[in-house]
Amino acid sequence: MIDLFTAATPNGWKVSIALEELGLPYTVHPLDLGSGEQKAPWFLKINPNGRIPAIVDRGSDDYAVFESGAILIYLAERTGRLLPKEPKDRSRAIQWLMFQVAGVGPMMGQANHFSRYAPEPIPYAIERYRSECRRLFDVLERRLAQSEYLAGHDYTIADIAHWSWVHCHGDAGVGIDGLPHLSRWIDRIAQRPAVQRGRAVPPQR
């Protein structure tokens, strides 16, 4: 019932993991980011920003949703799962989701870019983004010292969003030494069968 337009990136894995956790049927449409397929006119009709992931809900009048955080909220609300119903608990989950969308994701993306893909090393940029990533990891560590999951006792879309990025910390050159609660959380989520299935979407060529 859902078409998923994605690629093998942390933002893409957020949605495929959520779909697997929720048990929703979906069809994967991998986009070749290297060739710029995400900028094709047909895809811009789905996501005007020309980025993955995006979904089209065929069971709801072909309703299109873009931006990974918005997709996670849409899927959680559609199914009544992975997002608490009690207002304060729901707010807490959305706060941590926004922490990922506005902080962890962009900072890790920049650290990864300047560490691995910049035409020439720029030490200031590398250190700037790695240091900010580590600061954000420290925030997660403090939270997870108090709570099993980011929003409380229950696993939510906030955990899915963060895990999809944080488990790739090595790609950005950011260590997690001295962060035992974050390390425990990464390992626990990695053991979930739905996470393992979603992390493998789309199959890497």
Image: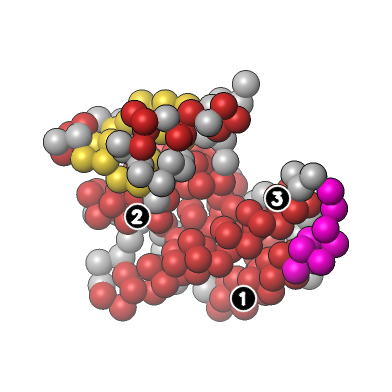
> Of callouts 1 and 3, which one flags the residue occurring earlier in the amino acid sequence?
3
Q: Position of residue 20 (x, y in %)?
A: 41, 38
Q: Position of residue 177 (x, y in %)?
A: 80, 65
Magenta: main secondary structure: helix
Q: Is residue 187 visible?
A: no
Residue 145's quadrant in the figure?
A: bottom right
Instruction: Work out which quarter of the rendered image holds the N terminus and state it.
Output: top left
Amino acid at pointer 2:
Ala
Check disc 1 and report its element: helix, strand or loop: helix
Which residue has dot 3 on it? Answer: 113
Give the residue at x 71% y 57%.
Answer: 111
Give, as a single range, the part of the protein colored magenta.
Answer: 120-128
Residue 137's quadrant in the figure?
A: bottom right
As drawn, the label of residue 139 is 1
Check disc 3 and report its element: helix, strand or loop: helix
Q: Position of residue 23 (x, y in %)?
A: 34, 37
Give the alpha-carbon distance from disc 2 to disc 1, as whole Å.
Answer: 23 Å
Residue 125 included in the magenta stretch of the image: yes
Give the residue at x 36% y 31%.
Answer: 41
Amino acid at pointer 1:
Val
Residue 191's quadrant in the figure?
A: top right
As drawn, the label of residue 70 is 2
Check disc 2 and report its element: helix, strand or loop: helix
Give the alpha-carbon distance from disc 2 to disc 3, as whole Å.
Answer: 24 Å
